[in-house]
Image (cartoon, helix red, strand yellow):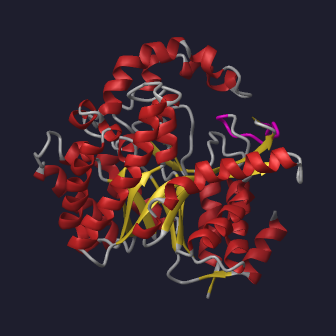
Amino acid sequence: MTKKTDKIFTEYSFPKDFLWGASTSGHQVEGGNFDQWTVYELDNASELAQTAPDRLRWMPDWMEFKDQAETPENYVAGKGVDHYRRYGEDFRILKKLNLNSFRFGIEWSRVEPDQGVWDKKEFDHYHNYIAELKKLGIEPIINLWHWTQPVWFEEMGGFSRSSNIECFVRFARKIAEEFGDDITYVLTINEPNVYSTLSYVAGEWPPQQKNPIKFGLTYYNLAKAHNRAYEAMKSVKPHLLVGPATQYGNALPKRPGHWLDTRVAKFANYFWNWWWTDRIRKHVDFIGFNYYFTDYWQGFKRDNPSNPHNDLGWYMEPAGISDVLVNAWMRYRKPIMVTENGVADANDKYRQWWLEETMHALMVARKAGVNLIGYMHWSLLDNFEWKYGWWPKFGLIKVDRERDMKRIVRPSAIWWSKFLKNIKHS
């Protein structure tokens, strides 16, 4: 790895204005949110704890997190990691890590707790939040929707009903009016493929429905919501650069050249990666995507190697992001921002390796001609990880929730900060 790192320093470079950053989402870190996920957590925490062995013991490292996974408190976001109050401290650490940008969510349920009612106090909070970032020279990147929405919107049927899209468009327009003079980049929809699948096919996430028709409607309506939000925001502040934060995977045939494996992998890439983005391609200033998975397909079965795996049991192939970058660039010819990329790794065994492999892959893609404008690592902080709760640890910064939310920078983050300090600029 040392040789590869030395090669990165000496043979490749990034533009001076390249966006190096980290990501969070409001519900996962802020604390004190009340949205449809809050309702789901409080209703289901006990059941999730009781069923944890049946759901999770297949994971290779089950015994390491068993005790926490079987505790109801694990499944409630509650106080989060108190980022709502401690954001200044977190931003100063971000700056010390040599990062120059930060992706975060403005929680819709905070600023519009009741339909058509805006909360000035919450807008003031986010104004101060953005001002603190700018004071430190950190580029704010706003994300509008990261799976959470006001309870009133959920009760209307959420994005499964096309008539509800106007509510999201109104929210997007309001954000442009409030913050447009202080920002450049806006992400609209986070991982519509993941949300639609887990909410309406698997039925694991709110509203916990196994309804393929609502899956299709929701997936399509999220594309319509993006397009209309794009038009609304650009009409208010034309300078804004607006894109999505969808999830892309790297599907490959298990047996290269095998006719069935190749066709299944090609279909998987189209359905998961391109179908949704094709429907917004005329309404993007850049392509934003999250990458975590390379998957190998043998026939109709996903057949990944068992190792290396992260704490969630996910097979890890960080270098696969270069294929995704090249394919996205060839398909859309738009600037690209990696809006999430990271690893669940409580003991920090793999994160430096993941970052090294990823940095090399980014430069391979740039050398192939990809117009890559930024990379946001997931996550800045340990956070609440949805249906898994608190035990998965994605943070560059460890948060000790038992010791007054103490922040501890992980060794892998220190390594990355040194890398960023020494990298050449083109």
Residue at the spot x=57%, y=83% of the render? 15
Q: Quadrant of residue 4?
A: bottom right
Q: Position of residue 270 (x, y in %)?
A: 63, 53
Q: Position of residue 227 (x, y in %)?
A: 35, 61
**Residues drawn in magenta:** 302-312
Residue at the spot x=68%, y=19% of the render? 57
Q: Say left or right for 247 vs 57.
A: left
The answer to whether residue 309 shows anywhere in this view is: yes
The answer to whether residue 340 shows anywhere in this view is: no
Residue at the spot x=68%, y=24% of the render? 62
Q: Nearer the viewer, residue 40 or 408?
A: 40
Q: Quadrant of residue 392?
A: top right
Q: Is residue 424 above or below residue 400?
A: below
Which residue is situated farthest in the bottom direction here? 426
Q: Quadrant of the N terminus?
A: bottom right
Q: Main secondary structure of the magenta part?
A: loop
Q: Is residue 178 above or below residue 63?
A: below
